[in-house]
Image: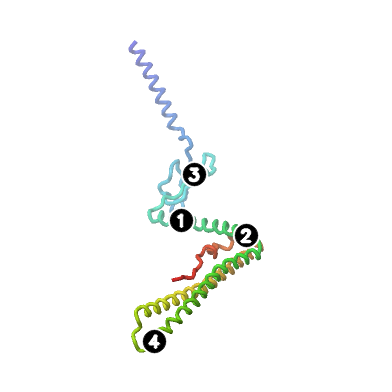
Amino acid sequence: MRMHRAVVAAVLAALAACSLGAAAQQPAPGAGIYTCIDANGRRLTADRPIAECRHKEQQILNRDGSVRGILPPTLTAEERAEKEVRDRAAAEARAAAADAVRRDRNLMTRFPNEAAHQRAREAALDTVRLAMRATELRLRELQAARKPLLDEAEFYVGKALPPKLRNALDGNDAAVEAQRAASASQEAELGRISKLYDAELDRLRRLWGGAPPGSMGPLPAGPASAPRPQAPRP
């Protein structure tokens, strides 16, 4: 009986060994063939990633020789940093291009023709013109308020002006200077808006003429996004 059991155990062990050997000879599920050209120009092939080509691209082939995929090279820390910079720049360029397309399409939706664009230009300029008229009115008010102060100051020729009168004249001077600065800023704003609308109109004419949206690069910020100068009233 003991001998029979030993024979059975030996047979089972042999069968297990044969099964393991057969399994070892079979490729792992999904295994591929790696191939590359090494630094010496030799084509290398293996059933796993090839160490000699770790810094090169390796093709992964199916058993029939068709390409299953690509194993990218292993990068050094410096190469990884450079790749990240390139990838980031490429992503930013793609985002800018998509934004240019979107903004060009929005521009054509807002302004289907030149008359619509001209109306928008005049509305933007009118905002500044209104502020300029307020500045001019304030300057006239300040000039009118200064006249009685100067008349009073004539009584003190060669003498020190009373503190109240001196403060009133100084305040008038400061207010006039502020209005003049506002006027200069408003004049510059008129020119800035006109220049932006000119550039926008040139872009629209090309888009209306058939140029693909986004083909002219990023669109500058539109005039409507800029703050409008207001006349200060000290």
Q: Quadrant of residue 128?
A: bottom right
Asked if residue 81 lies left or right of residue 200, the reply is left
* Residue ID for mark 3: 60
Kind of residue sitting beneath label 1: Arg
Q: Residue at x 43, y 84 (%)?
A: 151
Kind of residue sitting beneath label 4: Phe
Q: Quadrant of the C terminus?
A: bottom left
Q: Quadrant of the N terminus?
A: top left
**Mark 1 vs mark 4: in front:** 4
- Of marks 3 and 2, which one's residue comes earlier in the chain? 3
Residue 3 position (above or below residue 43): above
* Residue ID for mark 4: 155
Helix, strand or loop status at disc 3:
strand
Instruction: Residue 88: give its label.
Output: 1
* Residue ID for mark 2: 108
Q: Position of residue 43 (x, y in %)?
A: 47, 49
Give the CA separation, mark 3 to mark 1.
28 Å
Front-most of residues 33 and 179: 179
